[in-house]
Each structure stands twice: as structure tokens, then as C-alpha cells.
Image (tube, rainbow, N blue to C red):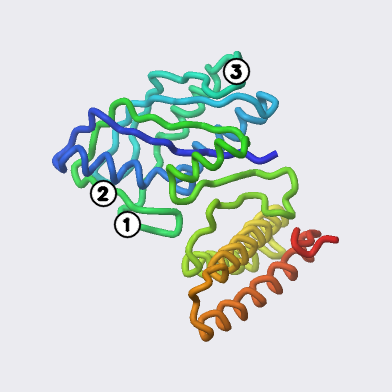
Amino acid sequence: MSRVLAFAALASGLFGCTPPQKLAAELVAAATPGHLRPVVACWEQEYEASGFEGEYMATLDLEISGSEVIESARVTALEPTGESRSERDTGPFRACLEKAFVGIELPSKEDADGPGYSSIVGASVRNYKIAFLGDQDERRKRAGGRQAHVLIGPRADRCQGLYVYHPPRDTSALFTEIALGKARAESARGKDRDQHARELQKTYDLQLELAARLRADLADASLPPANRKRLTEALDTARTEARATGAVIGCKPFEDRR
């Protein structure tokens, strides 16, 4: 079962030295799933506990320091949305969200997970809205339109990629993350079996994402022959590496299955 954490964010009543509209736009852009992983974890727990049903719109007030650290968070509203409105007690989910936001440090510059955010003297944010969506295809498409890269996962079939981004991210960022993932996996080998397995799975996910990105790039009919040849070779390499990592963790990439 896939899960989508879509940040359909809207910030109003934002106070700081920088013009509010600029701060709000930067904050919304920086609030990607990759930058707010503790929040992703809260939604994963809630969605699983609900039997994979229910969607929510959360409204929050945030205090962000000049060093881009979220110092406090208060959920002022948490309303069920979508076709299957959940009647679950939202208290635990609300508490988890408020705790998850505190201590998150937003990057001041763009990184592999998305744009950065910089306030210098901090900011007070009021009525910041985030949509938590389920796995319905139509809602996934709408979420993808709101945010450049939507994090989907964890999937029931980890061999398709436990976590994936839709659409796939830029190849340069993926090559960097794959190299780092391999290094972390190698560092954990023989020391921490669980950590080693997690890093291998993350690397496998990234390799599948890279292959998807390259396939998408190759779909451009206007590609010059030299570029198409280079991308085709890169795709072959990405597939080979994904198969090798998959073999270690007991997975066969979906496109190789019969």
C-alpha cells in the first residue's frame, strides 16, 4: 500500500524582516517531505493505524528561529478531508505532528531534497496548511501538481522501491545520493546488520529512481543522437547496479519480473 505525503502548503500571517510574501513562498517551497522526515513518519504511523483510510488538512502555527530551526509548533486544526472521512481520534496524530516539527532545521540553501529557506532573524508563521493524502491515484496526481517531488511510501512491495519520489528527481542529485548511500552501507557492513540493511534498501530505492529519471529523459524525442547514446548507456548502468543491489537484499527490479 502506497502512502503519499503531499505538502499543499499555504502560509499566512507570517512575520519577519523579509517581505511576508517572499518568506511564505520560500517556506512553502522548502517544506518538502525530504526536509520534514519526522512529519512523514507521523503520517505513516497514522495512515497504517487507520487501516489505510482517511486524509487530513492540518493547520499549524510555527515559530522559526534565525538559524532556520523550527522552535515550536501548534496544530490549530486537523480536519478530515476526501471521500472517506475518518472518524478516528486525531489526538495522537496531532500530538505527533507538534512534536515532529520541533527541532527540524530547514536547509538555508537548495539540496537534494528541494529548495532552501533563510530568514536571518526568524519568523512567526500563522495558518500554515499541509494536506496529508492517501494512496488514491487521482489525489496523487493533484499532489504532484502542487509540489515538484512528492514522496511516496513505504510500499508494501519494497522491491518496487520502499520509498520513491514522483516525479523522479534530477540525475545529478541522485548520482550524489547513490554514492553516499553506498559509502554508508559499506561503513555499516559487519558492524550494524540492521543499519547495513537499511542503507542497502535506500541505495536500491535511489537506483530505481535514477533508472526512472533516465527513462523519462530518454522519452524526449528531440534529444540529439549523442545525448541519447549517453543516456542509454547511463540507463543500462543504472539497471545493472539496481539488479546487483537487489540481489543482495533479495529483490528483483519490477521491470525484470516475468
Q: Please tell me the numbered disc located at residue 109.
A: 1
Q: Amino acid at mark 1?
A: Lys
Q: Residues within 10 Å of mark 1 (few under 14, many from 20)?
A: few
Spatial separation of the CA atoms under disc 1 and disc 2:
8 Å
| Secondary structure category for the residue under label 1 | loop
User: Which of marks 2 and 3 precedes in the sequence?
Assistant: 3
Question: In the image shown, does 228 or 62 lie closer to the viewer?
Answer: 228
Disc 3 and disc 1 in contact, CB within 8 angstroms? no
User: Which of marks 2 and 1 precedes in the sequence?
Assistant: 1
Question: In the image shown, does 85 or 69 lie closer to the viewer?
Answer: 85
Disc 1 and disc 2 in contact, CB within 8 angstroms? yes
Q: Is residue 52 left or right of residue 177?
A: right
Q: Residue furthest bottom?
A: 226
Q: Is residue 41 left or right of residue 189?
A: left
| Secondary structure category for the residue under label 2 | loop
Residue 218 image point, x, y percent: 56, 71
**Residue at x-position 50% and y-position 39%:** 142
**Residue at x-position 52% and y-position 22%:** 81
> Residue beneath label 3, please?
86
**Residue at x-position 66% and y-position 24%:** 50
Q: Amino acid at mark 3?
A: Ser
Q: Amino acid at mark 2?
A: Ser
What is the quadrant of residue 255 in the picture?
bottom right
